[in-house]
Image (spheres, helix red, strand yellow):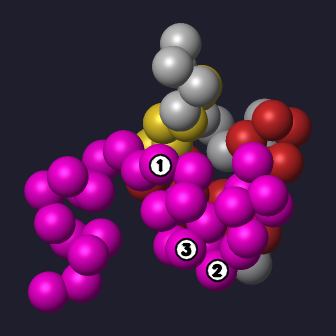
Amino acid sequence: MSKYNRPRNRGIMTLAEAGEYLNLSTKGTRQLALSGELRGARKKGNGHWQIPKRSLDEWIEKEFNLGSD
């Protein structure tokens, strides 16, 4: 079973998990989150990022023009 299908990772990912999912470095993923390109990404009070998997999928579709045109 892919680790992205496990219940914990279905909806929200950490910065490191999101980077692995996008095949980017953690630093690159953080830059996307800070720039607002990953919609819904937020930094909690404890300094940990929460990134919705849906926003990662939307970014992939936009970045690689995978929409249903």
Q: Provide the residue span drawn in magenta.
A: 1-30
**Crowding at label 1, few (<14), some or many (≥20) Cα neighbours within 10 Å?**
some
Which residue is located at x 81 percent, y 35 percent? 34
Three-letter amino acid code of the residue under disc 2:
Asn
> Which residue shows up at 73% across the image and 41% down it?
33
Disc 3 element: helix
Height in image: 38 above or below 43? below
- Where residue 36 sits, quadrant-wise, is top right
Q: Quadrant of residue 12?
A: top left
Dot 3 amino acid type = Glu
Q: Is residue 12 above or below residue 46?
A: below
Horizontal placement of 59 versus 20: left or right?
A: right
Main secondary structure found in the magenta portion: helix
Q: Nearer the viewer, residue 58 or 9?
A: 9
Look at mark 2 in the image and give the residue it sits on. 23
| Residue to which mark 3 is pinned | 20
Residue 14, image x, y percentages? 47, 48
From the viewer's perspective, tell me whether residue 17 is left or right of residue 4.
Answer: right
| Residue designated by label 1 | 14
Of the two numbered discs 1 and 2 on the same chain, state the one appearing first in sequence: 1
Position of residue 19 measured from the top left corner of the image (x, y, whole percent): 61, 66
Residue shown at the point (13%, 56%) measured from the top left: 7
